[in-house]
Image: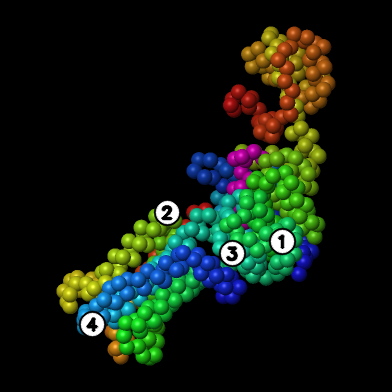
Amino acid sequence: MTITTATRTVAGIRLQSLTKSYGTVRAVDGIDLVVAAGETVALLGPNGAGKSTTIDMVLGLSKPDSGSVHVLGMTPAEAVRQGAIGAMLQTGSPVRNLSVRELITMMGSLYPNPMSVDEVLRLTSTSDIANRRTEKLSGGQTQRVRAAMALVSNPDLLVLDEPTVAMDVEVRREFWTSMREFAAAGKTVVFATHYLEEADSYADRIVLMARGRIVADGPATEIKATVGLHTIRATLPGVPINALTALNGVQSAELRGDAVMLHCTDSDAAIRALLRDFPAASDIEIAGAGLEEAFLLLTGNQTSEELS
Amino acid sequence: MNSTYLKYELLRTVRVRRGFVFSLIFPLVFFYLIAGSNRHVMLGGVSLPTYYLGGMASFGTMAAMISIGGRISGERTYGWNRQLRLTPLTTRDYIWAKVLTGYLTALCTIALLFVAAGTLGVHLQARGVLHMTLLVIVGLIPFAALGILVGHLFTPESMGPVIGGGVSLLAFIGGAWSPFGGDHGFLHDVSQSTPTYWLVQARFTLLGGPGWSATGWLVVAAWTALLGGLAAWAYRRDTSRV
């Protein structure tokens, strides 16, 4: 049996007012999200944004404090029982003392409609290591085997929690190629990542999370423009902030002693304007905004100083 | 029960070669060391080889069952349990497969001991061997529960002392090495109230004995209920904590 086409019409995932706290930390702070069947969605955010906690609740591995989770129209437990979910978690190495082929055969036997083992091995580029014992695999090989474990059930919903963390560039590209092939059969795919490029290249839609909330949600291009801000730093004493925000291409500005920081929608225009109006500016640096910084801009009025 | 899953679970057990061989060899070595050179000495009303066949069978099979805990503990630690919880595999089937791997090791242990006993002149009849084996299978049920319990309570690092110490203590009090607590009195009652005692007593069926008394069945049943309940509690506590 090869990859079967998903035929469900209900939402892949529906989260309503979802919250989860660990002690005093609100890991997930009221999330509403609908992922349509067949969509590939990236959960993008820095560490601690609540991505893994959200994923654990989607998979039924932890219970929400409040709010509801529906997966393919069912509770997570029911979806798991039906074998409708495949998942690659951040933790969990494959069990030892089995060959890769034996492991995938064993996992496949637990599901009602598994893919054929050979198909899974081909899809995840693990055919060449099929007879190797799982405890003798390299890090990258282990990741591929974990992907195979997630795919063998032929799931309608595939959930990947930072799947490419231990992969080098080439393995990463191969990995996403196989995931694309899988998703093409109408499968719903949700993956967590903190790489903007990864979310941009492989997702139809990006859900941006920070501090337990969804701070932006839309097509990759839209999100990319939002977080694609550049920052110009320069030493420039005694300049009023109004004069800086008035510059072409500058969205907002901050003063930190003698240093100025300009958040730019168009850093090329901004640097020209800055040097024209303030030739005394020195120590100039232009940087693409890190995700972290972009999130902060999106999520709050706090200045970087308050947060650092 | 999913036969493919069970097959690979058993295969994995046998493939942990050192662990598997060790649990088979250990009781055998003790048996020859102690009974081999004293085969005509009498102990507890039977010849020493007969005594130690029962003693080492209980020691070895008990260890095999409690070792289930080591495997469960390890799988919890490296996240395998979490992975399995995302599959339709039920907890019952997971536990069952673990228990059956314990029984596989236990039955190999006892089979080897029967062969060894034969070489030391213990009189073995098919009927007696079968009867003893059946009693041992029943007598191991509380130890299966104990294995599941410790597997959910302890980390793999502490599992060595827990299994080693626990098995030695239970074997000693239960009379696997030599009769514990005399023929009557408090210590004898303590010994009789352990499930190990009844594992050791199963050897009398080899001599045509009738098997356990009502007390024996009661003790085994009581320990099964108690340890089974505790194992279920430990499992629930462990999985609700994720």
Q: Tell me if I can see residue B94 in this picture.
A: no
Q: Chain of mark 1?
A: A
Report, in whole angstroms, how far the alpha carbon at label 4 lies from the one at label 3: 47 Å
What residue do we see at 41% from left, 78% from top? Answer: B112
Mark 3 highlights which residue? Answer: A98
- Along the line of sight, which residue is nearer the eye, A236 or A253? A236
Q: Secondary structure at mark 3?
A: loop
Mark 1 highlights which residue? Answer: A127
Mark 2 highlights which residue? Answer: B157
Of callouts 2 and 4, the N-terminal one: 4
Give residue A253's position: percent from left, percent from top. 71, 20
Q: How is the image coloured?
A: rainbow
- Please state which amino acid type lies under the numbered disc 3: Leu
Q: Tell me if I can see residue B76 in this picture.
A: yes
Give residue B27's position: percent from left, percent from top. 36, 71
Q: Are marks 1 and 4 in contact (CB under 8 Å)?
A: no
- Please state which amino acid type lies under the numbered disc 1: Ser
Number of the front mark, 4 or 3: 4
- Please state which amino acid type lies under the numbered disc 2: Glu
What residue do we see at 75% from left, 40% from top? Answer: A197
- Along the line of sight, which residue is nearer the eye, B204 or B21? B21
Q: Left or right: where does residue A267 sit relative to residue B84? A: right
Report, in whole angstroms, how far the alpha carbon at label 3 lies from the one at label 2: 23 Å
Tell me the quarter of the image containing the N terminus of chain B.
Answer: bottom right
Give residue A147's position: percent from left, percent from top. 68, 56
Number of the front mark, 3 or 2: 3
What residue do we see at 63% from left, 25% from top? Answer: A304
- Please state which amino acid type lies under the numbered disc 4: His
Q: Which mark is residue B40?
A: 4
Classed neighbour count for the residue bearing mark 2: other residues with Cα under 10 Å, few (<14), some (14–19), many (≥20): few
